[in-house]
Image: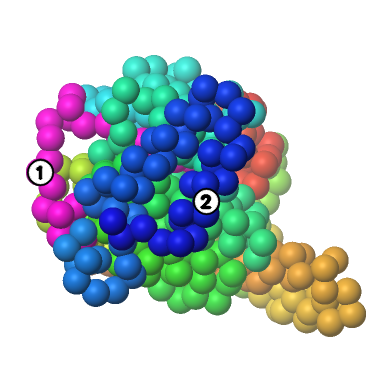
């Protein structure tokens, strides 16, 4: 009931490709979901059938954590691995969904079941979920494109995440929790538009939703730690008094997201979320980091116009060589966006947690921070 011709063709092709007992089982599970899923990912996009399916999913009772299966997508990422750890801590039956080539994080995945699959392939997701003793009741997506380029954004921020929404609905799950981004409030970039498109479709999906838009992660404002320890100046754009932010810690963001499962005030809900700090400018962040390190502050100011010149040049080249220069031009626009836009929440209900940015700086000054190719390429803790 409620199936579409396109989905029927997809299931038929799954049977045709079945070459092992695992694939046959997967096809049977997909067909069963198609015919019997109570929430139904395959109901019409509008009309009474969709409204009825949405109501069934959204009214589903919340089971105790020990009876609730939560599948975390993007589980090896900066926030994803903390969400896995928090789900286990709160007693949920936790599934960490990771790429086939990824290495599980034992320090974060203890107590969780690890599934491997390709989130860009609905068939791969279905095959992996078919191996679970019970289908997931809740899905939490921490998927995000690494680069933010147009192709990557379409593939991950929209299409792959949409695949996980459909997989939950097909399995009869009731709640989808999405890690989005504060910056979609002012969409000028490809990844922001992809996330907004997904948000809009999630609100119409036959499951209840919680959309969490964090301002910034601690790691995104601590990438200069190692350079300052080596005696380099703190680099900022303009006078350092623009683009204020109140970043949130990864563990407290994870807690907020997992709490959405049982807190019905966060159902069918979108929130912009920051940490407890007041808005800190880049200069204030730099002064704080120098103070924590016990060093004399030194700053290097880069004019915002540098971005404008680079973007202009790349856009001109893109006109002649679109394939070669589309992505570099978009990356330059991303850099400029984050150099001038506030990532700041001011309402009390849009702040969460107790860990301040200074707390984070004091910790990483002693312990070091985790390596990240984009935000902390000089970090000493490669993991």
Q: Is residue 260 visible?
A: yes
Residue 66, placed above or below residue 36? above
Q: Give SS at disc 2.
A: helix
User: Where residue 339 appears, x then y in whole percent?
Assistant: 58, 67
Mark 1 — residue? 61
Cβ–Cβ below 8 Å for labels 2 and 1? no
Lateral position of residue 39 relative to residue 337, left or right: left
**Viewer-closest of 213 and 289:** 213
For the point 46% across and 76% down, which residue is it? 186
Quadrant assignment for the C terminus: top right
Quadrant assignment for the N terminus: bottom left
For the point 82% across and 68% down, which residue is it? 323
User: Where residue 319 appears, x then y in whole percent?
Assistant: 84, 82
What are the residue bounds of the magenta stretch? 54-82
Q: Give SS at disc 1.
A: loop
Local crowd size for mark 2, using a 10 Å CA cut-off: few (<14), some (14–19), many (≥20): some
Mark 2 — residue? 10
């Amino acid at each position: 009931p409620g199936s579409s011709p396109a989905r029927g063709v997809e299931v038929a092709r799954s049977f045709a490709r079945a070459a092992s007992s695992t694939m046959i089982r997967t096809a049977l599970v997909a067909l069963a979901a198609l015919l019997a899923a109570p929430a139904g990912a395959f109901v019409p996009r509008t009309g009474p059938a969709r409204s009825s399916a949405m109501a069934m999913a959204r009214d589903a009772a919340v089971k105790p954590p020990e009876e609730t299966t939560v599948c975390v997508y993007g589980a090896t990422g900066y926030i994803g691995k903390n969400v896995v750890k928090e789900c286990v801590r709160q007693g949920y039956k936790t599934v960490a969904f990771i790429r086939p080539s990824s290495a599980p994080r034992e320090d974060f995945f203890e107590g969780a079941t690890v599934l491997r699959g390709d989130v860009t392939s609905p068939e791969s997701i279905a095959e992996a979920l078919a191996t679970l003793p019970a289908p997931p009741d809740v899905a939490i997506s921490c998927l995000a494109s690494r680069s933010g380029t147009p192709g990557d954004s379409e593939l991950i921020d929209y299409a792959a995440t949409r695949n996980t929404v459909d997989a939950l609905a097909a399995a009869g799950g009731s709640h989808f929790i999405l890690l989005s981004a504060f910056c979609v409030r002012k969409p000028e970039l490809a990844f922001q538009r992809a996330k907004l498109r997904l948000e809009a479709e999630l609100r119409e999906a036959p499951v209840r939703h919680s959309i969490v838009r964090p301002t910034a992660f601690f790691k995104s404002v601590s990438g200069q730690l190692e350079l300052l320890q080596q005696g380099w100046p703190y680099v900022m754009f303009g006078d350092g008094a623009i683009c204020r932010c109140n970043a949130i810690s990864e563990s407290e963001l994870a807690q907020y997201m997992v709490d959405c499962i049982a807190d019905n005030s966060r159902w069918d809900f979108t929130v912009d979320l920051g940490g407890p700090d007041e808005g800190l400018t880049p200069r204030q962040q730099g002064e704080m980091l120098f103070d924590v390190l016990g060093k004399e502050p030194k700053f290097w100011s880069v004019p915002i116009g540098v971005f404008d010149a680079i973007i202009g040049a790349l856009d001109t080249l893109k006109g002649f060589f679109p394939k070669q220069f589309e992505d570099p031009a978009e990356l330059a626009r991303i850099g400029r966006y984050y150099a001038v836009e506030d990532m700041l929440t001011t309402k009390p209900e849009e702040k969460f947690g107790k860990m301040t940015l200074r707390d984070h700086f004091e910790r990483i000054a002693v312990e070091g921070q985790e390596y990240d190719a984009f935000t902390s390429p000089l970090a000493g803790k490669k993991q």
